[in-house]
Image (cartoon, rainbow, N blue to C red):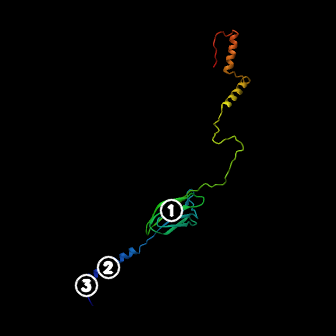
Amino acid sequence: MKRVPIWHLVTTVALLVAFVSQGTLALAGTTGGLTGVVIDASSNAPIAGARVSVTSPSQAASVTTDASGRFSFLTLAPDTYTVSVVRDNYQPFTVPGQAIFADTVQTVTARLQKTLSTIAHVTAVGSGSLVKSGTTADVYSVNAAGQNRCIRTWRRRQPQLGILGDRDRSRRLRRTESNGLFSNRTHSRR
């Protein structure tokens, strides 16, 4: 039997270690994953049938949640993704910046808020010109003719209401002064 030199044995072991360590790096996974659950924000109930999408510069994918509100993406290329969730009667949900690395699985919980539903449309049409566009209930426009009409009406109704205006009071006082009861005195009531 031939003797093998020790340096051959050391070289063989070193090459074997190099190949084994190189092989494990080459066999490592090249994709990552993203899993999660979609729930109602107010009741924490799972939302089935929600559409979950992930987008990045290198890849885009989408899935639908199962009956328990769960979803998973198992083969995503390492990148930074934006996760979007949409479902009828809920507000859209978006989470940017989800980093996916090789051989790792990220978890996302999407809490969706309910949206208001439109149950009817009502249209109101005015039958007269009581309300004019651009005018509020506290604003009235009175021109000079309207002011004169108001003054004439007020003056006509003063005697009926027992109100004497300044003009009528001064007439009465002058009449009384001419009778001599109030001679040369000035009277004014305010």
Q: Nearer the viewer, residue 89 or 169?
A: 169
Residue 15 is marked as 2
Task: Choose top left, top right, bottom left or bottom right for residue 166.
Answer: top right
> What is the spatial separation of the Cα atoms under label 1 and label 3, in whole angstroms?
61 Å
Element on which disc 3 rests: loop
From what the image shows, is residue 13 above or below residue 74? below
Residue found 53% across the figure and 59% down from its top: 93
Please identify, in this view, whether the residue under mark 1 or under mark 3 is nearer the observer: 1
From what the image shows, is residue 12 above or below residue 89? below
- Residue under numbered circle 3: 5
Pointer 1 or 3: first along the chain? 3
Few, some or many C-alpha atoms within 10 Å of disc 3 (few <14, some 14-19, many ≥20)?
A: few
Pointer 2 or 1: first along the chain? 2
Callout 2 amino acid: Leu
- Residue under numbered circle 1: 83
From what the image shows, is residue 161 above or below residue 117? above
